[in-house]
């Protein structure tokens, strides 16, 4: 696995506070561009940060892998939910992150697996059609909700979580890449607030330990 770790950057995540996070751009080139996810930080343990100002779920209506409209807030209301922005042609961070979550999820009792919602929202909608998303996710976890749609809409939705994504562009080798923040946001079933932020260093073991608590709306 190869990816670049960018220097720390600062940006406001709320009106009350801001924090600096070290981020990676999945499939980034040498342009120095760095997507930023900034959070109001209460406490941090390893790869997870507990937020003192939880994010609201993005108000997004996108298209799922069946070509049907999917209202994110409506469909995941009252459900423990993990949201990740990435793309299927990502060479490193995206497939690793989704695989780690899938492996950890399989270790849950079936009832808890059924309760958990994992949502993958593409940052490369031109290539990630519903069919392409469905095929890619089938090899990881077919129960993951894959969503695509208008790039500007997706970008604006990500921004509400403090996650910056840039329009796909060609690198110096002519390869199309998508530069985006690589955080997983966990939402509580109690109030639908995004209160946990996982960075790309989160391991299978960490997700395995935390998912049962996330499902109950508890802090890890």
Image (cartoon, helix red, strand yellow):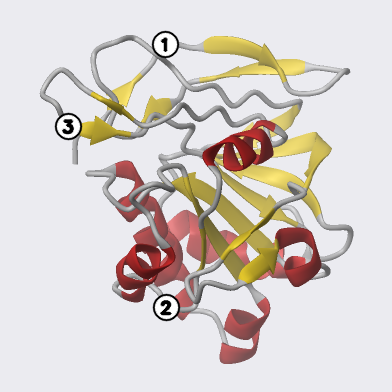
Q: Relative to 204, is 117 on the left or the right?
A: right
Q: Observer-nearest residue: 143 or 41? A: 143
- Where the N terminus falls, by quadrant? top left
Q: Relative to 28, is 121 on the left or the right?
A: right
Q: Which mark is residue 7?
A: 1
Secondary structure under tag 3 reads loop
Residue shown at 54% from the left, 10% from the top: 9
Q: Position of residue 38 (x, y in %)?
A: 64, 23
Q: CA distance from mark 2 to mark 1?
A: 35 Å
Q: Which mark is residue 142?
A: 2
Residue shown at 41% from the left, 40% from the top: 201
Secondary structure under tag 2 reads loop
Q: Between disc 2 and disc 3, whose residue precedes?
A: 2
Q: For mark 3, what is the residue? A: 175
Q: Residues within 10 Å of mark 2 (few under 14, many from 20)?
A: few
Mark nearest the camera among 1 and 3 is: 3
């Amino acid at each position: 696995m190869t990816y670049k770790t960018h220097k720390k950057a600062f940006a406001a995540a709320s009106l009350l506070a801001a924090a600096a996070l070290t981020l990676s751009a999945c499939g980034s080139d040498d342009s120095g561009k760095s997507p930023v996810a900034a959070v109001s930080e209460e406490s941090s343990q390893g790869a997870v940060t507990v937020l003192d100002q939880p994010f609201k779920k993005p108000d997004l209506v996108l298209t799922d892998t069946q070509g049907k409209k999917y209202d994110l807030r409506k469909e995941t209301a009252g459900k423990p939910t993990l949201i990740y922005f990435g793309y299927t042609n990502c060479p490193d961070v995206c497939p690793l992150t989704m695989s780690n979550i899938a492996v950890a999820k399989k270790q849950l009792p079936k009832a808890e697996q059924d309760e958990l919602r994992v949502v993958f929202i593409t940052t490369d909608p031109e290539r990630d059609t519903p069919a392409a998303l469905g095929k890619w996710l089938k090899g990881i976890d077919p129960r993951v909700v894959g969503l695509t749609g208008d790039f500007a809409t997706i970008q604006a939705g990500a921004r509400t979580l403090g996650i910056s994504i840039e329009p796909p562009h060609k690198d110096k080798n002519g390869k199309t890449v998508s530069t985006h923040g690589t955080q997983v946001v966990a939402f509580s079933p109690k109030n639908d607030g995004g209160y946990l932020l996982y960075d790309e260093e989160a391991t299978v073991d960490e997700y395995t330990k935390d998912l049962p608590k996330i499902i109950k709306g508890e802090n890890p």
